[in-house]
């Protein structure tokens, strides 16, 4: 009878050990399913591209701004105020690199040369 009990204990320990290993492997694999692959630099570059496209549209629709000078400087907030850029609910463009910073005060350089509008954003 002692041998039978020993085999049951060994079998029980083996089952618990296998279950534990399978449990930890499953948790390890599943935890990656919830991992956030948010790329901050990609998001920042996307926002800069959106600002550039908005500023280009603003420059192309307001060519009279370049009568005296072929380069003008505006803020991102000006693009928001003129309706060329859509902010978040609070009226800001969030900087993904620094969550406590907004991009509304960034300077946008719009240049009109050879009938082509080019844009640069500081930052």
Image: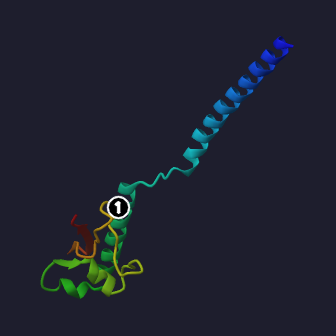
Quarter of the picture containing the C terminus is bottom left
- Residue in view at x 35 percent, y 63 percent: 96
- Residue in view at x 35 percent, y 61 percent: 44
Quarter of the picture containing the N terminus is top right
**How many callouts does the rendering have?**
1
Question: Between residues 4 and 109, which one lies in front from this camera angle?
Answer: 4
Q: Return the x and y of residue 61 as percentages of the image width and height.
A: 32, 84
Left or right, residue 19 beside residue 114: right
**Residue that badge 1 annotates:** 44
Left or right, residue 13 beside residue 67: right
Task: Quadrant for residue 11, please give it.
Answer: top right
Determine whether 90 is above or below 16 in the image. Answer: below
For the view shown, which residue lies furthest in the front direction? 2
Determine whether 41 is above or below 31 in the image. Answer: below
Q: Return the x and y of residue 8 as percentages of the image width and height.
A: 80, 21
Q: How is the image coloured?
A: rainbow
Q: Return the x and y of residue 7 as percentages of the image width and height.
A: 80, 16
For the view shown, which residue lies furthest in the right direction? 1
Determine crowd level at label 1: few under 14, some 14-19, many 20+ residues with C-alpha closer than 10 A.
Answer: some
Task: Quadrant for residue 13, please give it.
Answer: top right
- Residue in view at x 16 percent, y 77 percent: 70
Question: Between residues 8 and 19, which one lies in front from this camera angle?
Answer: 8
- Residue in view at x 21 percent, y 66 percent: 122
What secondary structure is marked by label 1?
A: helix
Question: Between residues 34 and 42, which one lies in front from this camera angle?
Answer: 34
Q: Return the x and y of residue 45 as percentages of the image width and height.
A: 35, 60
Task: Quadrant for residue 26, please give it.
Answer: top right
């Amino acid at each position: 009878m002692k041998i039978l009990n020993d085999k049951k204990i060994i079998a029980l320990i083996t089952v618990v050990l296998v279950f534990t290993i399978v449990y930890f492997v499953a948790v390890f694999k599943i935890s990656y399913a919830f991992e956030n692959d948010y790329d901050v630099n990609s998001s920042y570059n996307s926002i800069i591209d959106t600002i550039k496209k908005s500023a280009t549209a603003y420059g192309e629709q307001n060519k009279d701004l370049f009568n005296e000078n072929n380069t003008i400087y505006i803020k991102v907030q000006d693009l928001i105020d003129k309706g060329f850029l859509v902010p978040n609910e609070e009226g800001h463009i969030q900087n993904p690199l620094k969550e406590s910073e907004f991009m509304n005060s960034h300077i946008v350089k719009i240049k009109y040369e050879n009938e082509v509008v080019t844009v640069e954003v500081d930052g």
